[in-house]
Image: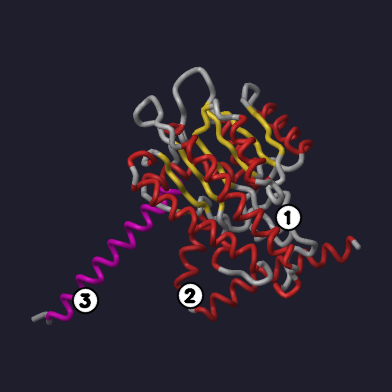
Amino acid sequence: MTSPWVRALAVVGGATLLYAVYVALDFFALHFIKPLRPLNSYKRKGPDPTYALITGASAGIGLGIAQELVKQGFGVILLGHLAYELAQARQALQKATPRASVRILVMDVRTATPTDMAVAVKSFDELHVSILVNNVGGCPIELPPMREMATYSCADVDAVINMNARFMARLTTLMLPILSRRPANPGERSLIINSSSAAHCGVPWLTMYGATKAFNLAFSRGLARELEASFASSHVDCLAIAPGDVLSQGNSRGVARGAPTWDDYGRCVVQTVDGAVQRKMRDVSPYWVHDIENRILPWLDEGTRTTEISKAIAKKKNAWDAYLSKAR
């Protein structure tokens, strides 16, 4: 006769297996079954375009997201600090999608004042803006970009916070009244995408950058829950994305083998958001390899986790140091 302990273990084992199968199938559906019309619920009906405001949009992931959004029929407002780069980005988007509605907004996120930002937001107050993509980020300090915290000045600390955290929080605050307006048609929604990073776990030689990305993640999760709790804002979705290594203009040294390019990653973001929102996820890694990495990392013991993270970042640091040494 089978003992109760054996039966209990069999039940636990069966439940664990079923859960593992469910997680695997859900992972496959999230990353490989794409919607026919991505982000369609965030479009406003009518002849005028529905816009997305995208920060850090002159190149890299921001431009990749913009490129995919205009393909889906959205207009985009590209925010960056260099007018000529924004003009080039607009030209590239309109060449790829000839009738795309593309506006540009020149602003240095490191030095913009609340007044500067309020005036900028007011300038497109009459547009149908339903999406905010807080993408801008980086490590705006003297080269090399990856170095010990002890080498930072107080100005360096402020610059990293300003670019990655303060500007994002201020812009979101200013945009919430626009995004929270109740659409005329039921079912139409608004969306905030906040770019965190795999660095939010805490990485050496990028301590300040990782800390600001952890702020972005907590900010996004808290705001998502807050918006959902109130009827007045329950139609506004908020989602953090956590990119891993992505090959782009600003990240081209020591990039992991098989890393997606900026345009591929932008496509992943646009095609994955609907599934993540439907699952009530507060954050998502749109590229499937990054998602696997982020799911495995918490299961490692701290010694192994530190070794693997340090190894990956050291590879990038050494590549940058070698490049800068040759450039001198």
Q: Position of residue 68 (x, y in %)?
A: 58, 36
Write down the quadrant of residue 184 in the picture. Answer: top left
Say what amino acid the circle numbered 1 marks: Ser
Q: Which mark is residue 252?
A: 1
Mark 2–mark 3 CB contact (< 8 Å):
no
Q: Is residue 72 magenta?
A: no
Say what amino acid the circle numbered 2 marks: Leu
Write down the quadrant of residue 200 in the picture. Answer: bottom right
Looking at the image, is 276 positioned above or below residue 7?
above
Q: Position of residue 133 (x, y in %)?
A: 56, 43
Structural distance between the alpha carbons of marks 1 and 3: 50 Å
Q: Is residue 19 left or right of residue 165?
A: left
Structural distance between the alpha carbons of marks 2 and 3: 25 Å
Structural distance between the alpha carbons of marks 2 and 1: 28 Å
Residue linked to disc 3: 9
Mark 2–mark 1 CB contact (< 8 Å):
no
Residue linked to disc 2: 300
Quadrant containing the N terminus is bottom left
Mark earlier in primary sequence (2, 3):
3
Of badges 1 and 3, nearer the viewer stands 1
Q: Mark 1: which secondary structure?
A: loop
Quadrant containing the C terminus is bottom right
Q: Mark 3: which secondary structure?
A: helix
Say what amino acid the circle numbered 3 marks: Leu
Q: Is residue 21 magenta?
A: yes
Residue at horizontal 32 percent and vertical 57 percent from the top = 22
